[in-house]
Image: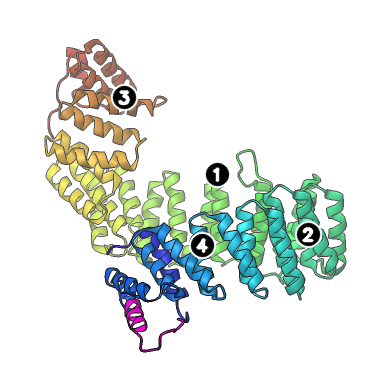
């Protein structure tokens, strides 16, 4: 019997919870009940649910009040999707044997999965009362109160648990943090702040608690109060990195930017603080004061320069700094920061990827070639270094070298490790072959690409479009184009391809529908090919004057259009494009 997928997690829980469950024996260890019951358990564990069910039903005739049997019946009913009956048997098992924690845990999980919050609350309240020393049930009860929106009741539970369990400052902090989050969830920010105040006053010698309270005050822009707390910290722990961060936040909030930077420079230059601790503090600070485009401000780069001076070979620092510089639009400096990684850590693929991306964004084709070639010496199995290199050669109109690089990539990329990357390489080979007027070779490459990645969007679109243009299998082309539209329903290119295939199949109404949708998604910058296709469809539907206007519009756009566009305009009639 096939399990309903939603119930698999229930069965796993049931399986774990049933271990060690005692079975009351009222008829002797050699009774039929025992034999049938344990045989049923064995069959259930082998997922032979129908056979197990028959044995359990026989046991039920012998003893209808055996909690272990009722629990097993509940599990089986869940396995066959009869949730209501399954829940009823689990409830009976728990009612007969409420001292068994496993039965209560199972039933509670069922109630939670069924969103029966009130039943779950009642159950956990009973279990919390029955097992007063078990925090597990109080945590579950508090969680259900939160889900039910009864935040005050949840907080009351945590208060009582703290009174019983909080024997250290860290315990008290954990409970305070929980209550703070609950207050914040309900918008009770004053009470959340009060939690942090009480904690800092209860443990005045714990610097982190006072810093946390100061941070909460800064969040509420209560700067004078925050400054008082920070002054207290300064008396005992003025070298703490979080203290400097809080002071910097205070200075930023009170428009003292130079002072804020000076505080963070202390963090950046502190040799007693590990870089792993500094980095998140510095970046958190940088993120609190961004420009109008939400980008890091260049004036804070001095902090990263300071850390880099003390840690010149730290890979993560250089990569992070490179990303900041790219966001700021300083690609030259980004390259300067990142490129040294390829010298002292040449197998660090992230660095090669990053400087390659910078070169690509700058359209620096010679640099793309140099980076790709060097990277392949250390990281031969990455498709990226073949693809970008080939694309740069293509843009330089050096198709021969582009093809050579791609063919080399097919030999170096392991299909099991990077099927999608290898698929993209075959995709590019297919595009090159079609441009060289070798459609059959192109289609062969596309087939290999789809074997590796059936959802390769570029292949599906181009293969479908070119197949239609060549008068090939239009049904196959339509299937591929349909999958494209399913994967990216609002892409003008794939919509145009789908519409064009309908045109080739003489379904002009559907062709118009999809091509016009493609045009509606690119009104600011329409594609000449799509506009021309629209004209073709209109001509076939008898709207010949409108068709001529669209052909003229396609001509005016430039950078596209078929080889027949001029003749269509000249003759005022649709002329099919010649096959390549």
Q: Please report the residue visible at 28 percent of the width from the left and 68 percent of the height from the top.
A: 50
Residue that carries the numbered disc 2 in the rendered image: 196
Q: Position of residue 316 (x, y in %)?
A: 55, 63
| Mark 2, other Cα within 10 Å: few <14 / some 14–19 / many ≥20 | many
Q: Nearer the viewer, residue 80 or 265?
A: 80
Q: Left or right: where does residue 350 sit relative to residue 481?
A: right
Residue 29, magenta (yes or no) = yes
Question: Magenta segment, which residues?
Answer: 23-41
Indicate which disc, 4 or 2, sits on the residue closer to the N terminus. Answer: 2
**In the rendering, which numbered label is found on residue 213?**
none
Q: Nearer the viewer, residue 61 or 453?
A: 61
Residue that carries the numbered disc 3 in the rendered image: 516
Task: Give the label, 4 or 2, closer to the camera.
Answer: 2
- 185 is higher (above) or lower (below) than 547: below
- The answer to which image quadrant residue 7 occupies is bottom left
- 567 is higher (above) or lower (below) than 151: above
Residue 311, magenta (yes or no) = no
Residue that carries the numbered disc 4 in the rendered image: 340
Q: Please report the residue visible at 39 percent of the width from the left and 89 percent of the height from the top.
A: 29
Indicate which disc, 4 or 1, sits on the residue closer to the N terminus. Answer: 1
Q: Nearer the viewer, residue 481 or 11?
A: 11
Q: Position of residue 83 (x, y in %)?
A: 41, 58
**In the rendering, which numbered label is found on residue 329?**
1
Q: Quadrant of the C terminus?
A: top left
């Amino acid at each position: 019997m096939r399990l309903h997928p939603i119930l698999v997690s229930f069965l796993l829980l049931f399986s774990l919870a049933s271990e060690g469950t005692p079975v009351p024996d009222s008829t002797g260890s050699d009774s039929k009940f025992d034999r049938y019951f344990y045989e049923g358990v064995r069959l259930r564990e082998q997922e032979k649910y129908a056979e197990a069910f028959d044995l359990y039903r026989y046991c039920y005739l012998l003893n209808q009040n055996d909690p272990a049997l009722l629990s097993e019946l509940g599990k089986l009913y869940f396995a066959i999707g009869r949730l209501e009956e399954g829940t009823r048997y689990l409830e009976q098992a728990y009612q007969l044997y409420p001292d068994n924690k496993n039965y209560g845990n199972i039933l509670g999980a069922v109630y939670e999965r069924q969103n029966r919050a009130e039943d779950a609350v009642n159950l956990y309240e009973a279990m919390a009362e029955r097992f007063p020393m078990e925090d597990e049930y109080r945590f579950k009860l508090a969680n259900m109160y939160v889900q039910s929106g009864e935040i005050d009741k949840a907080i009351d539970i945590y208060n009582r648990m703290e009174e019983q369990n909080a024997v250290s400052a860290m315990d008290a902090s954990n409970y305070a943090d929980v209550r703070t989050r609950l207050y914040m969830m309900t918008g009770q920010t004053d009470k959340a702040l009060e939690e942090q105040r009480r904690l800092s006053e209860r443990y005045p010698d714990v610097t982190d608690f006072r810093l946390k309270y100061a941070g909460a005050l800064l969040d509420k822009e209560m700067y004078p109060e925050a400054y008082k707390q920070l002054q207290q910290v300064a008396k005992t722990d003025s070298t703490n990195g979080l203290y400097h961060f809080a002071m910097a936040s205070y200075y930023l909030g009170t428009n003292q930017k130079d002072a804020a930077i000076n505080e963070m420079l202390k963090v950046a230059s502190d040799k007693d603080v590990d870089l792993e601790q500094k980095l998140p503090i510095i970046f958190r600070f940088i993120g609190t004061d961004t420009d109008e485009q939400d980008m890091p401000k260049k004036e804070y780069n001095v902090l990263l320069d300071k850390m880099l001076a003390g840690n010149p070979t730290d890979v993560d620092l250089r990569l992070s700094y490179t990303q900041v510089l790219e966001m700021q639009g300083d690609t030259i400096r980004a390259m300067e920061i990142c490129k040294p990684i390829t010298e002292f850590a040449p197998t660090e693929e992230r660095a090669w990827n990053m400087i390659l991306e910078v070169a690509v964004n700058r359209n620096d084709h010679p640099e793309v070639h140099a980076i790709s070639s060097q990277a392949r010496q250390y990281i031969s199995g990455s498709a990226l270094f073949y693809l970008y290199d080939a694309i740069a050669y293509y843009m330089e109109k050096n198709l021969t070298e582009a093809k050579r690089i791609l063919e080399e990539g097919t030999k170096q990329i392991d299909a099991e490790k990077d099927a999608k990357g290898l698929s993209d390489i075959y995709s590019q080979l297919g595009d090159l072959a079609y441009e060289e007027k070798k459609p059959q070779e192109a289609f062969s490459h596309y087939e290999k690409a789809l074997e590796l990645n059936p959802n390769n969007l570029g292949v599906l679109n181009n293969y479908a479009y070119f197949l239609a243009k060549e008068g090939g299998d239009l049904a196959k082309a339509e299937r591929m184009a349909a999958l494209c539209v399913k994967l990216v329903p609002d892409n003008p290119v794939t919509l145009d391809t789908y519409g064009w295939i309908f045109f080739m199949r003489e379904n002009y109404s559907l062709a118009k529908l999809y091509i016009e949708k493609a045009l509606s998604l690119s009104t600011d910058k329409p594609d000449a090919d799509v506009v021309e296709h629209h004209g073709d469809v209109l001509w076939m539907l008898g709207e010949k004057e409108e068709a001529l206007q669209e052909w003229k519009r396609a001509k005016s756009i430039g950078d596209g259009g078929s080889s027949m566009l001029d003749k269509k305009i000249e003759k005022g009639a649709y002329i099919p494009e010649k096959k390549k």
